[in-house]
Structure formats: C-alpha cells, structure tokens
Amino acid sequence: MLALLILSHSQDVARGVKEICLQLAPEDVVIEAIGGTKEGRLGIDAMKVLTTLEDLLNKSDGVIVVGDIGSTILAAKNALNLCSAPSRVRLADSPLVEGSIVAAVEAHLGSQLDEVLKKAEEAKLINKL
Amino acid sequence: MSANAISADDFLKIMKNTLEVMEANEEYLAKLDADIGDADHGANMVRGFKLVKERLTSLENPDVGKIFNTTGMALMETVGGAAGPLYGQMFVKAGRLAKEKMEVKKRDLADMWEAGLKGVQDIGGGATPGGKTMVDVLDPAVKVLKESANNDGITLMQTLKKIREVAKESAKRTIPMLAEWGRASYLGERSKGHQDPGATSSYLILRTILDTLNGEVGVKIAKYAESDGGILEEAYL
C-alpha cells in the first residue's frame, strides 16, 4: 500500500485537499495533510513534515509527496534528505490539488510508486476547457 | 575552551547567544527582508532560536552532535518560512558528523559545515554563490575552514577571525546581486541594491561562534545604510 502526503502553506487548503482525495480514494491508500505553522499561521512546520514522512514510511510501501509552493517544497526536500528511507519517497512536481487527487486515485487503484508519480506529474498538463 | 577545539559547553553558549543576537538584530533583519521579501526573517529567526534555547536547556548529556541536531530540529519546527528547512538541514547534517563528540577541531568543523552547506544546496535547488542567498556566505566560510584544516600554521581562533571577515564581506557582496532564488527572485532587477537577509543571518550566526569564544555575546548592527542595508557600524551586546 502507498501513502500520500499533502503539504500546503494553509491548514485549510491542506485539510480541504485531503477531504477531496479521501472521497475519491477512501481506502487502500494512507493520506496525510499538513498545512500552516505550529501556531496556525501561513507557512509550514518542517519538523512535522519530517516526522509524518517517517510515520508514513512505517505504514506504507512508499510515499508520494505533493506541495504547493516555496517553503513547502523546501520542507519536503528537507524531509526527503533526512528521512530513513529516501528510496521509497517521491516528490511530485505537480499542482497541489490536481496532483494530489490523481496520486490518491492511482495509489487507490494499486499502481506502483513510480507510476503514481508519473500520473501525478502529468496532472499539470490536464486541459480543463 | 582549549585553544584548538570548541567544546559542547561552548556550543551550548553559542546557540544561546545566537538568540540574543537575533533579538538584537530582529528589526534590522526585518528591514532587509521587507526590501526584497516578506519582512518576517527577523521574527522567524528569533522564534526559532527561542525554541532552540528551550530545547537545549532540557537536553540531557549534550554532545556536539546532539546540540546541532536539537538546534536544527527546533528551527525546522518553528521558523515557518524557507529559513526553517534550510537552517534545519544545515545544523542536522553538520551534527551527524559530530555524534558523541564532546569537542570539535578545525578538521571536524570543516567537514561539518561542508556537509551542512551541501544539504542546503541539495534542498535549495542547487543554489550556488552569486544567487543572493545564504550560500553566498556559507560557501566562502566553508572554503576558509577547509583551507585552514589542512594548514597546521593557522590556529582555530585565526580561522574563526578569517571567517568573520570573509562572511561579513560576502554578505555585503550580495547587495548588487540579482536574486535567483526564493521570493526575492520574483522582483527580478528590483532585487538588486539590497543586502540579502539570509546571507546576513548566516554572517551573524557564524561570527557569534568567535564572539562567544572571546567571552562576548555577539553584536548588534548599530548603524546601516538606509538605501541598501549595508552594515556601517556594529556594537557588542
């Protein structure tokens, strides 16, 4: 089973994206979302990102991480660089909402880690109109 | 402190003094960040080093590795902006090379800061000197450390003095640079003409090592150029 880690500057955005993902992928994938700083301001708690990533690595075969911009990406790279099993982690270069949804659905369908990554990254090419 | 090594006790003092230095320079760092960023670097660094101090106070049997690891983790947890993961990465990576060491010498410091810098560059998208970031100060400081590690004729204190000079000069050299990374890069040409806040906090962190070993707390930037934030006068706390 794979896991998805959603990172946003905003706690509300993180929670909301997780909610959508859970509706489309209610089982067979572990989904966690982190948003905002420890004090609830806009930003990211990079330590929580690292500890949550470790926790997800323990619970799953591999973790896909999707972040919004700037320091969430730095926090994701920081965690990847310090965690115990970087070979089972993939950072997706994709828009947060669309990338997370695609990753959740692909993981839910039982795809392998690199396939989930590929599909999540293709999300930036989705035409909506 | 012995003349050729920095002890775990010294590092406890250095980290605590760094909080005082960040508090004294909070407004200055905020001004630099207001010019090309979001004005929160001063407050972020103060919040970060407050937790560092708190965590170090309750740290049991501190060795250099534990002190660096605890410092990095606390910065990751509280700084919030880009500086949290970047400085967090620097201290944690450096600390992994000082596990169970009760003191470190020139060679250890060179290896530690080289690993810390590499971590910063890894997660920062490969930032190299010239891009108006903390790497502009850390890279030349690591070069000084590496040169002196291989030269028995240079003492630890001479090395740290050289780092102070080079780091200050390097922070100043970010003024005309075009920002290539982070929020400042959105400003394009308008990022020129301002000293980089991350390079400046890196200078303050590095020089506080020397200041602490010399029995001082550290410095406050007492006067700076309004136009570009360049340092004009420093005063010991």
Image (cartoon, grey):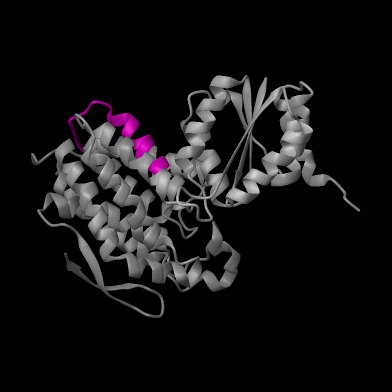
Q: Is residue B119 visible to us here?
A: yes
Please state the extent of the stretch shown in magenta in the rendering.
B88-105
Q: Is residue A16 left or right of residue B84?
A: right
Relative horizontal placement of residue B135, taking residue A95 as reference (left or right): left
Queried whether the magenta region covers residue B34, the answer comes back as no
Q: Position of residue B143 (x, y in %)?
A: 33, 46
Q: Nearer the viewer, residue B81 or B198?
A: B81
Is B211 situated above or below A122?
A: below
Q: Main secondary structure of the magenta part?
A: helix
Q: Locate residue B1, reporting x and y percent.
A: 9, 41
Coordinates of residue B98 in the picture (x, y in percent): 27, 30
Residue A63 occupies quadrant? top right
* Residue depicted at 38% across the width and 42% down the height: B90
Residue B98 inside the magenta-drawn segment: yes
Please indicate whether residue B165 sits to the left or right of residue B117 in the image: left
The number of callouts visible is: 0
Identified at 50% across, 65% down, the residue is: B37
